[in-house]
């Protein structure tokens, strides 16, 4: 295998191992119906499948470039080596025999992989990255590539000029995103990117949205990149199930930034098991208006204080046996509250209280625990049909996962650039630390992983734009892999900074703190592997 083959042979091997694991697990789990008796095997398989998808996406991108893709070759080789090792180490859990494992790895393939993964190749990737100051100037593979590249450049300039100067101060002081920044983002159309023009948005592609999210998150994950996620979630849900009147009423103000959105789904005792939500919506009439009263608690409702409306998922069917079929989605209006706590009252006696939970990172929007007590919601705030809220929300969550992949890639990119800059400036033993073999290897490793996360995210966005059958699955895989990359790259970049990486005055400490939340929200990593990716892959059978 040579550095110029874009990892083709390694990719074939990695895919072969993934296919072998898939075939065995389909049998052992009864096509995904019995995954709970094989949880670790399914999780490992799902993680591998996501990395194989990332290797395919990176190889496809590299093949479209004029120059050979050394990062693609290295990444495919790494995935292949890890796949073989996984099959060997956990063959009993997968139901493989030693002969099965031996048949996967052809003679000489291990040697070829080992040669490809020589540390000198990682240093060569770092040298390529240093030429570009580790910035992302890679070509885009899309029909509207020039338009999206222009969007990337303009968003990067905005992020550098308007977001980056505020990011560290917002983090250190645990401040709310400034109103003038929200206004500037609204003027540029960031809140209406996925909303069709007929409803007041810009109607851009999912790929454009992910690229813009990545650039904003590179400057600040919570104060910019995540700010455009909440309207995205509500907009997708409305487009999936809202009535025409609801779309006309809500999408325009959301697109213009006049209505900021919070999402209220998770509950204090219910996280990933959405079907078990207990917050209740009971049909009621108040002052002659038919509607619903909301009772119960919600947790981790980010931006709920400042938000003008909440996209709230509640149980409208009191029978717990109804599961997800008994959930409805509501648009809940509220006053803007700029502090860390609020207590709102309705004339009819309804009450909504919220308290922000202190977190080590992801500061700027504040995540609230909410308590609803007889909070009245008019009937026309029910999105679509009662009992269909879970399905509408899932449409929003698929978009949210895709956008989270973009956010994670942006944070990984910020960490990479911080590490590259520090490696050039910091001198030890008479020369910049970037000249040392170990530092250069680490930088090359970061470049490779970040690009793999980026290309998988872009591939998932393109699949969603094409309405591909596997778009939701790819979005989940992109979220899973990119979030893990953000954690790993930020922590390696912090180590490269040495003691200064632990000082809050350095942005890398903020990146590390912010990255910790990424594998948790929009589907916590183990559940995403097991119940979303694993179940979908295995349900397809052989």
Image (cartoon, rainbow, N blue to C red):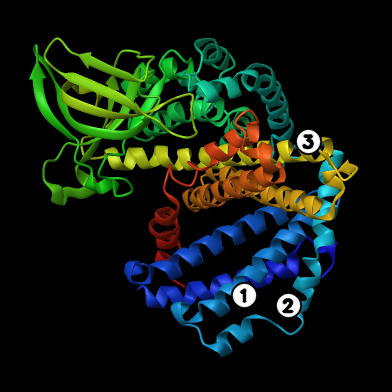
Residue nearest the viewer, comparing 441 with 62:
441
Q: Look at discs 2 and 3 and give the one toward the viewer.
A: 3
Residue 289 is drawn in which quadrant? Answer: top left
Label 2: how many Cα within 10 Å (few below 14, some 14–19, many 20+): some
Tag 1 near tag 2, CB within 8 Å: yes
- Residue at position x 74%, y 70% in the image: 9
Residue 359 location, x and y as percent? 43, 33
Q: Which residue is mark 3?
A: 421
- Residue at position x 22%, y 47% in the image: 276
Using the rendered image of the protein, determine whether residue 152 is visible from the camera's viewpoint.
Answer: yes
Q: Which residue is mark 1?
A: 84
Q: Is residue 116 left or right of residue 102?
A: right
N-terminal-most mark, 1 or 2:
1
Residue 133 location, x and y as percent? 81, 36
Q: Look at discs 1 and 3 and give the one toward the viewer.
A: 3
Q: Is residue 161 left or right of residue 340?
A: right
- Residue at position x 9%, y 19% in the image: 285
């Amino acid at each position: 295998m040579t550095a110029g083959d874009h990892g083709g042979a390694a990719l074939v091997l990695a895919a072969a191992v993934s296919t072998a694991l898939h075939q065995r697990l389909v049998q052992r789990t009864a096509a995904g119906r019995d995954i709970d008796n094989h949880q670790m095997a399914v999780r490992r398989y799902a993680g591998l499948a996501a990395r194989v998808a990332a290797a395919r996406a990176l190889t496809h991108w590299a093949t479209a470039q004029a120059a050979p893709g050394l990062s693609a070759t290295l990444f495919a080789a790494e995935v292949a080596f890890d796949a073989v090792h996984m099959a060997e180490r956990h063959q009993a859990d997968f139901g493989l025999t030693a002969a099965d494992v031996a048949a996967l790895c052809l003679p000489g393939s291990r040697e070829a992989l080992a040669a490809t993964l020589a540390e000198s190749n990682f240093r060569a990737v770092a040298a390529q990255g240093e030429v570009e100051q580790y910035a992302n100037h890679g070509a885009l593979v899309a029909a509207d590539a020039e338009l999206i590249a222009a969007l990337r450049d303009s968003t990067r300039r905005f992020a550098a000029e308007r977001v980056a100067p505020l990011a560290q101060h917002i983090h250190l002081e645990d401040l709310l995103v400034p109103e003038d920044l929200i206004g500037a983002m609204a003027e540029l159309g960031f809140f209406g990117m996925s909303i069709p023009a007929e409803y007041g948005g810009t109607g851009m592609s999912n790929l454009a949205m992910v690229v813009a999210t990545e650039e904003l998150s590179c400057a600040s994950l919570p104060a910019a990149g995540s700010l455009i996620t909440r309207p995205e979630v509500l907009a997708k849900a409305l487009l999936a199930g809202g009535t025409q009147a609801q779309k006309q009423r809500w999408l325009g103000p959301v697109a213009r930034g006049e209505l900021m959105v919070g999402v209220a789904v998770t509950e204090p005792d219910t996280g990933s098991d959405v079907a078990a939500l207990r917050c209740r919506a009971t049909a009621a009439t108040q002052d002659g208006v038919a509607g619903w009263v909301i009772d119960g608690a919600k947790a981790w409702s980010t931006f709920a204080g400042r938000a003008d409306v909440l996209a709230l998922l509640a149980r409208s069917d009191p029978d717990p046996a109804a599961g997800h079929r008994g959930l409805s989605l509501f648009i809940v209006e509220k006053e803007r509250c700029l502090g860390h706590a609020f207590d709102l009252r309705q004339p009819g006696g309804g009450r909504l209280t919220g308290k922000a939970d202190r977190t080590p990172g992801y500061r700027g929007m504040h995540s609230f625990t909410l308590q609803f007590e007889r909070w009245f919601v008019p009937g026309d705030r029910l999105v679509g049909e009662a009992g269909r809220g879970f399905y509408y929300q899932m449409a929003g969550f698929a978009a949210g996962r895709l956008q989270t992949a973009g956010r994670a890639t942006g944070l990984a990119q910020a960490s990479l650039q911080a590490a590259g800059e520090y490696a050039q400036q910091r001198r030890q033993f008479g020369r910049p630390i970037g000249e040392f073999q170990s530092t250069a290897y680490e930088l090359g490793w970061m470049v490779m992983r970040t690009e793999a996360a980026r290309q998988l995210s872009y591939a998932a966005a393109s699949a969603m734009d094409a309405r591909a059958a596997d778009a939701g699955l790819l979005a989940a895989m992109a979220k899973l892999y990119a979030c893990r990359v953000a954690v790993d790259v930020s922590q390696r970049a912090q180590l490269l900074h040495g003691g200064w990486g632990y000082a809050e005055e350095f942005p890398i400490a903020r990146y590390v703190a912010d990255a910790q939340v990424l594998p948790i929200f929009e589907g916590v990593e183990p559940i995403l592997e097991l119940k979303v990716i694993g179940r979908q892959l295995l349900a397809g059978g052989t």
